[in-house]
Image (cartoon, rainbow, N blue to C red):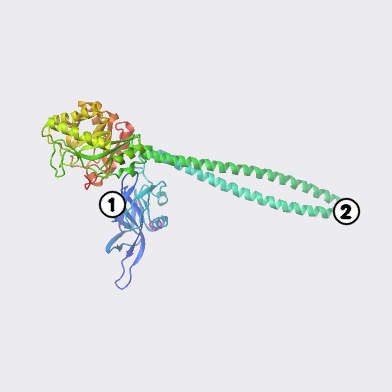
Amino acid sequence: MGRFILENDYHFLSFHDIYEKAASSSLPSLFDCVAVLEMYQVSNGIFMFRDYNYTAHFHPQKTHGYAFGNDIKVQNELEIYGVVIRGEKLQTLIEELKNASKCLNVNRQGLCLMGVGTVWHNIGAYYPVYELFDWRKYGVNVQVTGVELLNGEAGVKEEFYQKEDELKDLGLELEKTKKEFYHVEKELKDLSLELEKTKKELYQKEKERKDLSLELEKTKKEFFQKEKERKYLESHLQEKEKDLRLCEKQLDEKDQESKKLTKRLHVVQNEVIIGSIYREYCSNDSFEKRLQNLSAVSRETHVVLAFARDYDDWDSHTNGIFKVFFDQNMTPLMIANFKRDSPTAKFFLCIGDRSQRYPFDVTDKHTWIINATTSLKCIIQEYGFHGIDVYYTRSNTNADDFIYAIGTVIDTLMTQQIITTASIAPCSFMHGPDCKFYAGLYNRNPMNFDFVVFQTHDDDNDIPMNDAQQLINIFNKLASDDNFPKEKLVAGHSILPKDWDTLPYPVILTALPQLIKSGVVQGTSVWTLTDDQP
């Protein structure tokens, strides 16, 4: 009997069906099961899965199956936070996921994803559904982590659950009041029938008045008593109707309050991970759809187009004559239209490169400065860039030449009002104790640089950084030892899985809310360029 431990927040359970291994003389038959699929998060809360290979399959009795010609081992036990789900409970889980939707995916925290615009058995995008899967019915005590609820979200959700319980209590009370109302209404009908009967008896007694006058008097008294009771019941019924209307009003108010809490929950999820500045490095127009709604979360949005390099198409160094290598579909008109629709957005031209193929190099400093100033001025004015981002991870020159050459070009472009802002993107390769390239460039003229974007994914350490506190200490050191002001610091990270070998994605997701909340950094920078892009 195999057991699988669901200990990864990016492992999602979903309904699946596979073939049962049949004898050679009979046709194979399908059976229902639960399968584990590994997801990863892209931007704006969207999840996707890497490929269509399931990590594990579960069924209460089956141990083997096959699909697409491959034998599949089927586990009989699923462990979540120390609780083992097997037998009837595992069968119940299979049926619940099957009845929900074949596109519903749920992780151990209860986070639900729903495929939108996808075709079954095809890879597509999955979006969070802001209702949690109730693991409590399976005896699982869900633990809060950085992936599920970042920073302040836990308190909001607890309050949401509390209001939801109050809403249920009011619903029960309303149901009870309805039953009482129906009961009183029935009594009223019974009394009306009885009154009618009494009237008939009264008429009959009237005919016999002379002989039965005493009994007639008694009947009259009974009639008046019943009438009094009827009026009392009518009054009581009116009070119950008032109570019913009050309960309906309270129910509506609780519903509105629940919607407000849900909206607050969405805002908290974005604020704690983005900050007041959001920057994205890209090389094509893919940023348009991703960034069109970010103005509601971040105070300022940066689009950094990469790269402009002083190399030609054959990788030969041109000594300061820069040329753009981003997608040619990025036209000046497209940038102008985006700036018109998003007034808080700023466009930066990124000079340099992440790879070792295009290091910073100067054949002649004087010539390089003239060539760089002239060529960059033409590019900036053609496309309408607000500023320049300096992003080199390698240099063939010493720090002094790097600082003097680039610093002089930035000074000139600022003085001529060609650009209004600039940023630097330090990384550990060129920012060690013996090679203060970026610290020296910043300190040469701090007024030129409005943003310092430390790229955490460009690390020269062969050992992955698995401790969020270690990353937090690096940013504290940048502010204290290197004198980079906190109000200019931005945390840069990559959303590409290949870069997570250096800095695992859960580590940056854990560290970012703490850095933003403490004021050490003011925002987030995201690297989106793949290897097949310039």
Residue neighbourhood size for the residue with mark 1, other residues' Cα within 10 Å, grouped as few (<14), some (14–19), many (≥20): few
Residue in the image at 41% along x and 38% along y:
155
Q: Secondary structure at mark 2?
A: loop
Can the viewer see residue 266 in this picture?
yes
Residue neighbourhood size for the residue with mark 2, other residues' Cα within 10 Å, grouped as few (<14), some (14–19), many (≥20): few
Q: Quadrant of the C terminus?
A: top left
Residue corresponding to mark 2: 211
First-in-chain label (1 vs 2) = 1
Name the quadrant containing residue 4. Answer: bottom left
Residue in the image at 37% along x and 46% along y:
142
Write the start and end of the magenta stretch as one range: 89-93
201 shown above or below 529: below
* Extreme residue in the left direction: 363
Name the quadrant containing residue 434. Answer: top left
Q: Amino acid at mark 2?
A: Asp
Can the viewer see residue 469 in this picture?
no
Q: In the image, residue 277 lies at what x, y percent?
A: 32, 35
Q: Amino acid at mark 1?
A: Arg
| Front-lying residue, 310 or 47 | 310
Q: In the image, residue 331 lies at what x, y percent?
A: 28, 42
Residue corresponding to mark 1: 50
Q: In the image, residue 523 lies at what x, y percent?
A: 31, 35
